Image: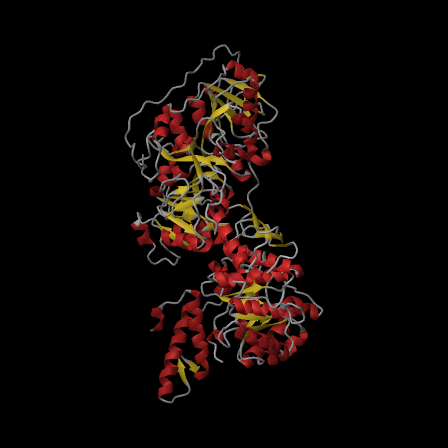
């Protein structure tokens, strides 16, 4: 069945998942649903301590068995040890058919690929999968489907019960013996625990794993003892060097700086750039440079930001320090400066649900004026792909991309027109992950295209000296340079689903076919 | 031989290693006035042969969007320069830059090869221009004869690295070691009616120093500066951008001279300043600079 | 043109490709490794064959490691390697065999 972004979703997949096809961002507005409740266990006789000696012991206590869903959060990013240590135990116990429900999976989790191959793990529900897991999924090694969701979509799936978590594992930088978890402190300091909050509220069993046990009460708790069944102390939950890096050196790549300059000039010329505006950006070189340039313009024009949202990095936190924003709303901290900033009274931790769940009665993303995003590919319908690489292999994550793009008044995608030889602006993206209706502007090193669905923005830019072009022109320039790309060759088998924010199917990802030269010789 | 391009605007001439595909594929997005595709210092001795293929195909197939494409060939003392010229001319370059020029004879030797390459590859006679880089004390002393050596020569450039070594000093950042050469070259170029370009500024981290350097050479009368990184381009263009008042004044001068010429008046005043025909070219240059910088507005014409 | 000995041109930097040629064993034998093979594999092969054909090369072992080079770079590296293998560095046929 054809969906609203023109993708054919196989009937078999619709049947298998019970899902519908994507019908537009606003399709479910006003829908009535009952929230799922966990099958929870009351803990009366804990003796004041929920400490268990080992992960294996806790798995037994939680009644681990074949077919369960276990969940993880990704605040430790490439430095995460939790997923691997839990899955290793589950594997050692001979458990099969586990579904991993993680807020994201990355390179740090390459070691679990053998568990995919041997059937320990047969399902994945995650914002994305990178590294070797992505290759394994695209290679058809996962028995079930990999469902890729947005950060907001994941919370929706958990709260509606579409995904039911049996055991949630929460890596806690600090925790007391009674289960009060904080993202702050300890060796694996990651600042916040936003993505784990839905898991704590909705999983049947909740296990905190920490490498820094502190005396009760570990307050104010980011995840409360009221939700935690067990606590396990281990030697290390992550590699601090890979959890929060030192602040990235400002880019000197002139191409990125050029795009950042275009971006800033665009932003300041929109009607939304006025006292009290709101802003979110990512962690790429161009995004960070845009924030730095924007801060300069704000100072020059005496304009203050009301709130900044992230995924935070130093340049965003500097806005708070320098009094250029009233507050920051934080779901994740990418560098040490951001982790440090969490202590500021106007630096607020928010849950992934507050951040982006489309089935809430409200989410922060809907109050955004600007979001600056990246993309692997954008097509002439402004559809974006942030998950599937140019070789057809899953290599990225939806993250907050579809959430912020849908919510923000002005969603800007910044990308070089081509990366190596791969055109970033193309006729049709390999896989749609964010629908074109959410994207307002595409900024490249060769020019800027405004979505024709935004005549107001086109009007606002009438006399602005920027290289405006149509999206088709950008595509044509890209192809003139790189040549027209052929479509990646896939097998028939569907290995993954791009789930839209509302749980419908945006697109499917098929098993990748090893490249074969075409028949005809020159 | 008439080639209008001799006088084109060259505020920035950006060096690019001719055999680095990532660099030469789209330098035009940074909007330099000219690029210099380098076969000389940037290319290692054992890569001189393959670099030419890279240069040739870049010239043939990349649309540089009207930016002037100059090729820096290897010096006349090397075994490479003749083939460099053949390759550059065949590829369709706009100009060749001759390094280490020390005499009019050097220019004429190169010119002869350019001449025959134009014929060999069917390019219009005189379509390929020449510029000369002055890199030695002798070159500085011979600047005037170099400037006047060829009708193809559109300008000379100071190459400060080699020149300061020859002078037994080094680049100090103050400009003191370059003072004489700069002054000498710009005077020689003006005397011969050709353009003059300043040497590169190699410390990419010192953007303030770069700015001071450009301000100095702008006031000295240089037409532009060689740059080694796109991040230097905007600063040069900014410094070479005339103000709105300059442009308005230039238009008045042009209009008055045109009008007064009709009626045979040679000297008159504009806004209280004494003006004569000698101001004409300068005023035209101001308009051209304003247009190139993108700051030009037609309403300033009245 | 003939490939008289083995030769290499190009680098493994992004947007470049490294081409190695050797005398063939009766025919054109192409080994291609590319970071963009899924989308440009056929195009790269076409450019390589065209370039060899123009130079009249029918007997060659050619292996290419491509890091996203544009067609113009692929041509330049193939020709560069072939002319090296032929020992020719002067009076090259610009605009003729090299086009």
Q: Position of residue A137 (x, y in %)?
A: 48, 32
**Residue B94 seen from this side:** yes
Which quadrant is home to the C terminus of chain B?
bottom left
Q: Is residue A242 left or right of residue A126?
A: right
Q: Position of residue B78 (x, y in %)?
A: 67, 69
Q: Position of residue B183 (x, y in %)?
A: 60, 75
Query: In this view, which residue lies farthest toward the bottom?
Result: B264
Query: In this view, which residue lies farthest toward the top?
Result: A45
Image quadrant in which you'd find residue A361:
top left
Residue at 59 percent across and 60 percent down: it is C1
Q: Position of residue B193 (x, y in %)?
A: 53, 80
| Scheme of colours in the image | secondary structure
Is the residue B248 above or below the residue A306 in the image? below
Quick one: A493 or B262, which is closer to the camera?
A493
**Residue A344 seen from this side:** no
Quick one: A78 or A408, which is closer to the camera?
A78
Quick one: A143 or B271, which is closer to the camera?
A143
Q: Is residue C15 left or right of residue A405?
A: right
Q: How many marks?
A: 0
Is the residue C6 above or below the residue A72 in the image? below
Is the residue B255 above or below the residue A122 in the image? below
Is the residue A363 above or below the residue A478 in the image? above
């Amino acid at each position: 069945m054809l969906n609203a972004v023109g993708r054919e979703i196989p009937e078999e997949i619709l049947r298998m998942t019970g899902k519908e096809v994507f019908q537009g961002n606003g399709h479910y507005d006003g829908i009535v649903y009952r929230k799922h409740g966990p099958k929870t266990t009351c803990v009366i006789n804990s003796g004041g301590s929920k400490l268990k000696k080992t992960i294996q012991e806790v798995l037994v206590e939680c009644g681990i068995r074949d077919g369960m869903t276990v969940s993880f959060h990704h605040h430790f990013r490439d430095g995460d040890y939790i997923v691997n240590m839990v899955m290793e135990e589950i594997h050692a116990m001979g458990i099969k058919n586990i579904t991993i429900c993680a807020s994201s999976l990355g390179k740090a989790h390459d070691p679990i690929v053998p568990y995919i191959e041997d059937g320990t793990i047969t399902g994945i529900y995650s914002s994305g999968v990178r590294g070797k897991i992505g290759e394994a999924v695209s290679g058809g090694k996962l028995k079930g489907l990999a469902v890729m969701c947005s950060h907001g979509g994941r919370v929706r799936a958990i709260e509606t019960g579409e995904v039911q978590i049996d055991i949630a594992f929460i890596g806690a930088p600090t925790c007391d013996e009674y289960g009060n978890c904080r993202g702050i402190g300890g060796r694996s300091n990651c600042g916040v625990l936003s993505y784990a909050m839905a898991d704590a509220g909705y999983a049947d069993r909740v296990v905190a794993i920490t490498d820094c046990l502190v005396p009760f009460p570990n307050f104010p708790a980011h995840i409360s003892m009221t939700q935690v069944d067990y606590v396990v102390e281990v030697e290390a939950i992550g590699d601090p060097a890979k959890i929060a890096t030192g602040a990235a050196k400002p880019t000197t790549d002139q191409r990125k700086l050029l795009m950042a300059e275009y971006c800033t000039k665009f932003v300041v010329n929109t009607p939304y750039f006025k006292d009290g505006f709101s802003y979110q950006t990512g962690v790429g070189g161009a995004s960070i440079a845009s924030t730095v340039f924007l801060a300069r313009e704000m100072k020059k024009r005496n304009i203050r930001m009301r709130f900044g949202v992230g995924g935070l990095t130093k340049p965003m936190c500097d806005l708070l320090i320098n009094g250029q924003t009233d507050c920051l709303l934080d779901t994740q901290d990418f560098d040490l400066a951001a982790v440090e900033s969490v202590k500021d009274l106007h630096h607020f931790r928010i849950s992934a649900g507050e951040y982006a769940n489309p089935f809430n009665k409200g989410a922060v993303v809907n109050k955004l004026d600007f979001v600056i995003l990246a993309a692997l590919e954008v097509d002439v319908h402004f559809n974006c792909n942030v998950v599937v690489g140019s070789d057809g292999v899953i290599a990225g994550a939806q993250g907050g991309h579809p959430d912020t793009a849908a919510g923000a008044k002005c969603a800007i995608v910044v990308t070089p027109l081509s990366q190596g030889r791969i055109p970033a602006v193309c006729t049709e993206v390999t896989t749609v992950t964010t629908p074109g209706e959410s994207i307002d502007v595409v900024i490249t090193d060769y020019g800027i295209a405004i979505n024709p669905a935004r005549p107001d923005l086109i009007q606002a830019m009438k006399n602005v000296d920027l290289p405006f072009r149509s999206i088709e022109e950008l595509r044509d320039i890209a192809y003139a340079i790189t040549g027209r790309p052929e479509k990646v060759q896939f097998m028939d088998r569907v290995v993954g689903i791009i789930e839209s924010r509302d749980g419908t199917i945006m697109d499917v990802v098929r098993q990748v076919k090893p490249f074969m030269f075409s028949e005809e010789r020159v | 031989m008439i080639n209008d391009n001799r006088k084109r605007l060259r505020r920035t001439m950006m060096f690019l290693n001719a055999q680095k595909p990532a660099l030469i594929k789209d330098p035009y997005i940074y909007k330099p006035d000219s690029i210099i595709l380098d076969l000389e210092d940037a290319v290692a001795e054992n890569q001189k042969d393959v670099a030419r293929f890279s240069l040739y195909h870049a010239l043939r197939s990349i649309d540089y969007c009207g930016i002037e494409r100059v090729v820096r060939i290897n010096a006349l003392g090397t075994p490479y320069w003749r083939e460099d010229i053949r390759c550059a001319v065949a590829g369709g370059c706009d100009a060749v830059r001759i390094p280490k020029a020390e005499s009019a004879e050097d220019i004429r030797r190169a010119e002869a090869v350019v001449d025959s390459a134009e014929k060999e590859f069917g390019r219009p006679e005189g379509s390929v221009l020449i510029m000369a880089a002055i890199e030695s004390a002798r070159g500085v002393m011979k600047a005037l004869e170099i400037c006047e050596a060829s009708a193809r020569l559109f300008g000379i450039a100071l190459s400060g690295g080699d020149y300061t070594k020859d002078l037994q000093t080094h680049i100090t950042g103050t400009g003191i070691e370059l003072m004489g050469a700069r002054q000498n070259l710009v005077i020689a170029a003006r005397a011969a009616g050709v353009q003059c370009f300043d040497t590169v500024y190699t410390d990419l981290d010192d953007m303030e120093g770069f700015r001071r350097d450009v301000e100095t050479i702008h006031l000295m009368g240089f037409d532009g500066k060689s740059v080694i990184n796109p991040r230097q381009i905007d600063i040069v263009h900014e410094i070479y951008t005339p103000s709105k008042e300059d442009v308005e004044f230039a238009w008045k001068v042009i209009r008055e001279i045109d009008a007064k010429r009709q009626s045979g008046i040679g000297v008159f005043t504009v806004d209280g300043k004494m003006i004569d025909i000698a101001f004409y070219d300068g005023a035209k240059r101001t308009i051209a600079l304003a247009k190139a910088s993108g700051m030009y507005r037609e309403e300033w014409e009245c | 043109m003939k490939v008289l000995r083995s030769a290499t041109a190009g680098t493994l930097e992004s947007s470049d490709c490294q081409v190695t040629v050797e005398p063939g064993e009766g025919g054109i034998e192409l080994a291609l490794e590319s970071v963009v093979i899924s989308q440009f594999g056929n195009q790269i092969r076409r450019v390589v064959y065209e370039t060899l054909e123009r130079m009249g090369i029918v007997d060659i072992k050619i292996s290419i490691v491509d890091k996203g080079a544009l067609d113009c770079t692929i041509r330049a590296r193939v020709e560069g390697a072939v002319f090296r293998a032929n020992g020719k560095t002067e009076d090259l046929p610009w605009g003729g065999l090299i086009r």
